Amino acid sequence: METFDIAIVGAGITGCAIARQLARFDLSICVIEAANDIALGASKANGGLVHAGYDPAPGTVKAQVNARGCELYGTWAQELGFLFRRTGSMVLSFNDEDRAHLEKLRSNGLANGVPELSIIGPERIHELEPRASAQTSCALWCPSTGYVDPFEVAIAALENAVANGVTFMRSAPVEAIEVAGSDDGAARFTLATPARDVRCRYLINAAGNGAADISHMAGAEEFQMVWRQGNIVVLDKEPRALMPLYPVPTPVSKGVIVTGTVHGNTVITATAAVREPGDTQTYASDINALLSGARKLVPDLDTRRVVRAFAGGRPVIQGTNDFFIGQSAVVPGLFQAAGIQSPGVASAPAIAERMEQVLRDAGVDLRERDDWDPIRHAPDDFDRAPLARKEELIESDPAWGQIVCRCETVPEAEIVAAIRRRPGAVSVEGVKRRCRAGMGRCQSGFCQSRVVAILARELGCEPSEVLLEDTGSWLVEGPLKGVR
């Protein structure tokens, strides 16, 4: 059994951001993840918008971390090497009632510290986004909004944390937590997992949709999670990425949003329906609602160009629409980062910053390490590399010239690098999240068998043992044609 100063349960974007924030201190830290990779829960099934912070009600925890998180993304992107585009966004108004709501959002935003909010007319709207509906009468213009790939942010943060000494345990669902007292009055935690047991002095609960279970096992606050399911649609790449366009929000959702992505696709996100926990099915009614909502915002959007539809669940705490970030009032030494629904991606850097302060306020000794390195160098992206860099890579290793994924121009060497990174990919979907092999128009139709063969070779296993995603998701049962 290993002992750590801090154990963080959950390797979604929240847990990974907290791990990265705390890795600068002279502490032993472990991140414990139930699945076999990073960001396999709410962080994966996500549109990637870095909301600016005008939507949360002033005074809520969401309001306190959203605008700050959005502000921090520029620095985090530079230090961690992930793609981030600060494009600005517009909330479109179609009638007088909508206009009144825009005024409320602007007031919220000013109270929450969102910079440069303004209400603009049709001429300015179409200067900023020529494809926005001609029926819109005015819009809330917010220059600070942007977008990222949420799993890329989580992977980058945890890679940096691991490089600074953090331990990552995958395929380790927490099955039980034993809490014992100590001479100084703080609790000591022993976490039982199938991988191995872990003992820690402080426990951070960042388990997403499993946060209520972790809190219950530790004998702390009792709360229930609501599975607010969202369907999302991804369209093929556009010649020019769309600016994020929002409708006037509802009490439970920001509505159907159309946005570009850092890789040039268009995403339509997201429905909001309370469904059974774990439901990741896509529903025709939801998809139709997304497509019709998107066409209202962008009438010329070709919604026939869908390449992928998927769904996930937001970790909502029943009875509240806010985040729960702080030390447990029941179990000293347990710190909660629960209910991190939207705008969780936008807030992640600030949630990490806030958790650091919560630990300080609780008396945790945080002394910065002399050898802390905040920089994580992004891996080579062959598709985006200048021609001179492509030639340099191929000269260094001919596998850089062996294209495996044609849609996204991903060579064999880039896939190998994704597997060998720390923590690296151990599944087909893990490769996809790190270097986009299989992300394109054919959705792995061409490259999947070759990715399986590379994984088998690099992991030292048979192709029949390679997983699509998590435990039990085998792809083949026998020899692959042409693979020995």
Image (cartoon, rainbow, N blue to C red):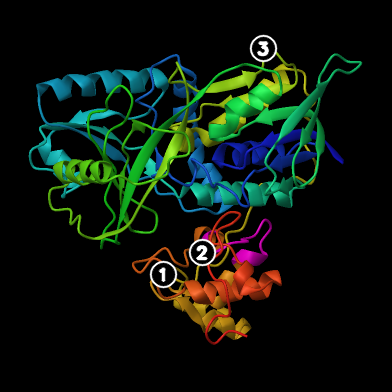
**Label 2 sits on residue:** 435
Is mark 1 in CB contact (under 8 Å) with mark 3?
no
Based on the picture, tell me whether residue 452 belongs to the magenta stretch. no
**Label 1 sits on residue:** 408
Is mark 2 in CB contact (under 8 Å) with mark 1?
yes
Quadrant containing the N terminus is top right
Based on the picture, tell me whether residue 424 belongs to the magenta stretch. yes
Q: Is residue 455 left or right of residue 46?
A: right
Residue extending farthest to the right is: 183
The residue positioned 28% from the left and 22% from the top of the image is: 106
Label 1 vs 3, first from the N-terminus: 3
Q: Return the mark for residue 263.
A: none
Foreground mark, 2 or 3? Answer: 3
Residue 306 pos. (x, y %): 27, 58
**Label 3 sits on residue:** 329
Label 2 vs 3, first from the N-terminus: 3
Residue 294 sits in which quadrant?
Answer: top left
Element type at mark 2: helix
Residue 180 sits in which quadrant?
Answer: top right
Q: Is residue 392 left or right of residue 56?
A: right
Neighbourhood count class around disc 3 (C-alpha, 10 Å): few under 14, some 14–19, many 20 upward: few
Neighbourhood count class around disc 1 (C-alpha, 10 Å): few under 14, some 14–19, many 20 upward: many
Q: Which residues are magenta?
A: 418-429
